[in-house]
Amino acid sequence: MNSSKVFGEFVSKRCEEILSQDEEYQKFNDAIFNTENEFKKSLSPDQIKDYNRMEELNMESIIYAAVCIYNTCLVDIENVKKIN
């Protein structure tokens, strides 16, 4: 496993840890989950398959964005340390 993938997994797990403790995030997550389940009831099996694929891509995109932001923050921290 390459270091980029390992780091991505670390960031993903760390984000999960942080968000699992955040009440506001949990409220959003619950609302999304409930709305999504109601919406899926109106879909055909093929539409559900397509919807689930879209959700997978969305999650991959969110994880990728988190890793990019995390990496940038680490670089920013190092740059600030160099200035001070």
Image (tube, rainbow, N blue to C red):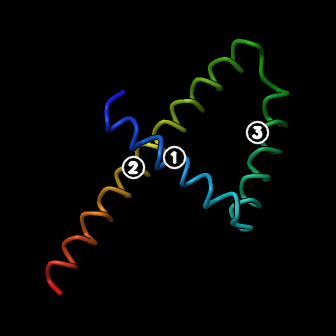
Q: Is residue 19 left or right of residue 5?
A: right
Corner quadrant of residue 40: top right
Give the residue at x 85% y 37%: 38
Residue sticking out furthest to the bottom: 84
The residue to which callout 3 is attached is: 36
Q: Crowding at label 2, few (<14), some or many (≥20) Cα neighbours within 10 Å?
A: many
Q: Quadrant of the N terminus?
A: top left
Residue 64 pos. (x, y %) = 41, 43
| Label 3 vs 2, first from the N-terminus | 3
How far apart are the alpha carbons under marks 1 and 2? 8 Å
Tag 2: amino acid: Val
Residue 47 pos. (x, y %) = 69, 18
Q: Is residue 77 above or below residue 36?
A: below
Rendered image: mark on residue 67: 2
Cβ atoms under marks 1 and 2 closer than 8 Å = yes
Q: Crowding at label 3, few (<14), some or many (≥20) Cα neighbours within 10 Å?
A: few
The residue to which callout 1 is attached is: 12
Q: Is residue 74 above or below residue 81?
A: above
Rendered image: mark on residue 44: none
Q: Secondary structure at mark 2?
A: helix
Q: Quadrant of the C terminus?
A: bottom left
Q: Is residue 11 left or right of residue 56?
A: left
Cβ atoms under marks 3 and 1 closer than 8 Å = no
Tag 1: amino acid: Ser
Q: Secondary structure at mark 3?
A: helix
| Label 1 vs 2, first from the N-terminus | 1
How far apart are the alpha carbons under marks 3 and 2? 26 Å
Residue 7 pos. (x, y %) = 39, 44
Tag 3: amino acid: Glu
Q: Is residue 30 above or below residue 9?
A: below
Give the residue at x 54% y 38%: 59
Give the residue at x 42% y 42%: 8
